[in-house]
Amino acid sequence: MTATINTLPDPSSATFSSALQTFLQQEAANRDVLRQVSSIVSGGLHGTAAGLVGSPGSVVAFPGGYYTTESGSITYSDSKSNIWVVIGKDTTTSPPSNWSVYPAPIT
């Protein structure tokens, strides 16, 4: 039986110090994701506004158990679609190109 989710770094490795730091930063979050659902603690919502720019304010969230903050504004592609915004631990800009949009935007 393994007592950790992530592989423990090899103490004899030349990169042990940095690998241990990464392990310690991620292990607790990876355990939490098994116990809880990702959540937004505060912020992240905004009402309608003129133009295609919305400011959801400061967001505090735990995507996958990782503590994440974000603030700023969002420029939407059009005013006809329902737009869902995703907060993730690894990005503060657009999601990766392999993400798909479903249903397709109304044009």
Image (cartoon, rainbow, N blue to C red):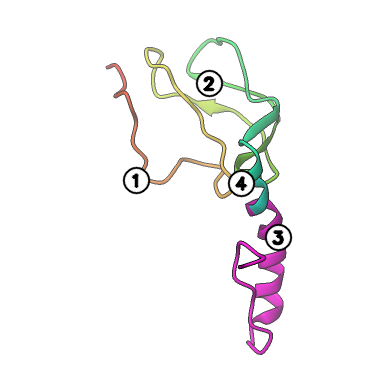
Q: Residue at x 41, y 46 (%)?
A: 96
- The magenta segment is 1-30
Tell which tag, 1 or 3, sits nearer the viewer: 3
Instruction: Sort mark 4 into few (<14), some (14-19) or many (20+) by Cα contacts within 10 Å.
Output: few
What residue is pinned by disc 4? 34
What residue is pinned by disc 1? 98
Q: Earlier in the sequence, mark 2 or mark 1?
A: 2
Q: Position of residue 27 (x, y in %)?
A: 67, 59
* Cα–Cα gap, marks 4 and 2: 35 Å
What residue is pinned by disc 2? 53
CB under 8 Å between callouts 1 and 3? Answer: no
* Cα–Cα gap, marks 1 and 3: 27 Å
Tell which tag, 4 or 2, sits nearer the viewer: 4
Q: Amino acid at mark 1?
A: Asn
- Relative to 77, 3 lies left or right: right
- Relative to 77, 92 lies left or right: right
Q: Earlier in the sequence, mark 4 or mark 2?
A: 4
